[in-house]
């Protein structure tokens, strides 16, 4: 990609004021100043933001000449392969553990430590942790926590960090920042699409990155397995008696027969959610016999992270998840009444 603007330096005081949290970001700068040999991690089943937060943070670490290793339990989705350092992100399950565990670890887009999956072979028990995230439910498990719940994506928080670092904006960084914001707002559609999101996105576009191509790659394109899984999920579509909840399910057998991965399920829960009069959409995904992952999506009427929280999960107001034990049928019988209980207190259509 040809660089449109050279020495693309922003008006730092204005950008820093827009991101606020000066003390918090200063702590992050101090952490970056004292660290060495960093392990950079994000959550399992990485989505667009997890992948983009990993690659954009990797770019920052390279700018600061901080040696680091980026790793994920699962492979980053291939559709993000154009991102900076994508091919250097290791997959933990097929990589030999290091001789010495990392003492400095950066977590991106993780509401809690467990979201990375088991990386105990990589992370020292007393590791010094920089936690960079945007989930309101973040457990603040870091030595330093850079958590901005107003931010639409982890990459938006990373852009805030970039503004305080006063680095020069380059395309490869802008590409990842933009992708994370685009995917976590579902194409700048969700209520987390603030003026700051669009200002940051516009500034990223000014470097010359192709916004329409990124949109097509990260939101438009889909896999054959996704379409097959969607077909099976919709065959099991059900509505609650009052029509305010719609839910679908996917079994282990579906995953096996379609050769599907977790990433192929992305977006499926939005389809029941978008049906007329529906306020909450749910996807029940059988992980293995007796374990069901529940993905919840809502409009303005309720906070689904409260429901997820009842079962040890979490997330955002309008997008959350948890895991329950039992069959898909059991999970439906546990979750749907809990949602109904909340919805009956809310007037129809959000109120
Ligand atoms: Mn995110």
Image (cartoon, grey):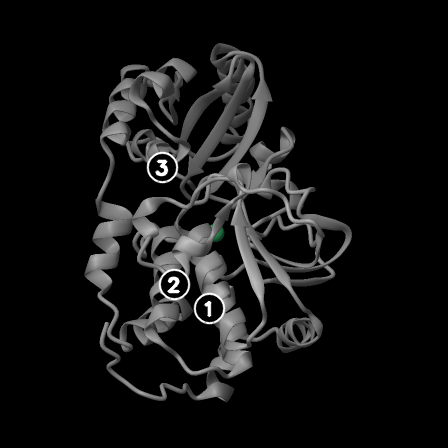
**How many discs mark residues in the rendered view?**
3
Tell which of 177 and 237 is nearer to you.
Answer: 177
Residue, disc 3: 266
Query: Is 39 drawn above or below residue 259 in the view shown?
Result: below
Q: Give yes or no for contact between labels 3 and 2 (Cβ–Cβ under 8 Å).
A: no
Q: Pointers 1 and 2 in contact (CB under 8 A)?
A: yes
* Residue under pointer 2: 84
> Disc 1 versus disc 3: distance between alpha carbons?
26 Å
Which residue does the image show at 60% across and 38% down from the upper left?
117
Vertical comparison of 48 with 276: above or below: below
Residue in the image at 46% along x and 33% along y: 296
Using the image as rendered, state which of residue 142 and residue 298 is in the foreground. Answer: 142
Please tell me whether mark 1 sits on a helix, a strand or a loop: helix
Residue 323: % across, % down: 57, 27
| First in sequence: mark 1 vs mark 3 | 1
* x and y percentages locating residue 28 in the rendered image: 65, 71
Of residues 97 and 149, which is closer to you in this image? 97
Disc 1 to disc 2, how far (Cα)? 7 Å
Nearer-N-terminus badge (3/2) = 2
Q: Position of residue 229 (x, y in %)?
A: 29, 24
Quadrant of res 177: bottom left
Mark 1 Cα-neighbour bin, 10 Å: few <14, some 14–19, many ≥20: some
Any mark on residue 210, and which?
none
Kindly report which numbered mark, 3 or 2, lies closer to the viewer in this rendering.
2
Q: CA distance from mark 3 to mark 2?
A: 23 Å
- State the quadrant of the C terminus: top left
């Amino acid at each position: 990609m040809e660089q449109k603007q050279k020495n693309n330096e922003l008006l730092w005081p204005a950008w820093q004021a827009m991101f606020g949290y000066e003390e918090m970001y200063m702590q992050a700068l101090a952490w970056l100043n004292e660290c060495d040999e960093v392990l950079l991690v994000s959550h399992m089943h990485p989505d667009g933001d997890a992948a983009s937060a990993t690659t954009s943070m990797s770019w920052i670490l390279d700018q600061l000449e901080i040696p680091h290793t980026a790793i994920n339990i699962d492979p980053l989705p291939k559709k993000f392969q154009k991102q900076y350092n994508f091919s250097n992100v290791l997959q933990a399950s097929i990589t030999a553990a290091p001789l010495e565990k990392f003492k400095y670890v950066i977590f991106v887009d993780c509401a809690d430590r467990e979201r990375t999956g088991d990386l105990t072979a990589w992370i020292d028990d007393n590791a010094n942790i920089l936690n960079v995230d945007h989930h309101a439910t973040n457990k603040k498990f870091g030595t330093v926590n850079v958590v901005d719940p107003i931010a639409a994506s982890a990459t938006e928080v990373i852009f805030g960090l970039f503004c305080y670092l006063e680095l020069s904006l380059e395309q490869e960084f802008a590409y990842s920042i933009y992708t994370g914001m685009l995917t976590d707002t579902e194409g700048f559609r969700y209520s987390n699409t603030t003026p700051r999101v669009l200002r940051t996105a516009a500034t990223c576009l000014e470097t010359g990155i192709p916004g329409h191509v990124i949109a097509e790659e990260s939101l438009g394109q889909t896999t054959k397995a996704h379409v097959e899984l969607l077909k099976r999920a919709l065959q099991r579509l059900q509505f609650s008696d009052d029509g305010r909840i719609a839910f679908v399910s996917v079994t282990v057998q579906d995953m096996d027969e379609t050769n599907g991965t977790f990433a192929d399920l992305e977006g499926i829960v939005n389809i029941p959610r978008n049906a007329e009069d529906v306020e909450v959409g749910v996807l029940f995904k059988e992980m293995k016999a007796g374990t069901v992952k529940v993905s919840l999506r809502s409009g303005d009427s309720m906070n689904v992270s409260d429901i997820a929280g009842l079962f040890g999960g979490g997330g955002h107001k309008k997008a959350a998840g948890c895991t329950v034990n039992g069959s898909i049928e059991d999970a439906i019988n546990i979750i749907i009444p809990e949602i109904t209980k909340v919805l009956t207190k809310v007037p129809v259509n959000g109120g």
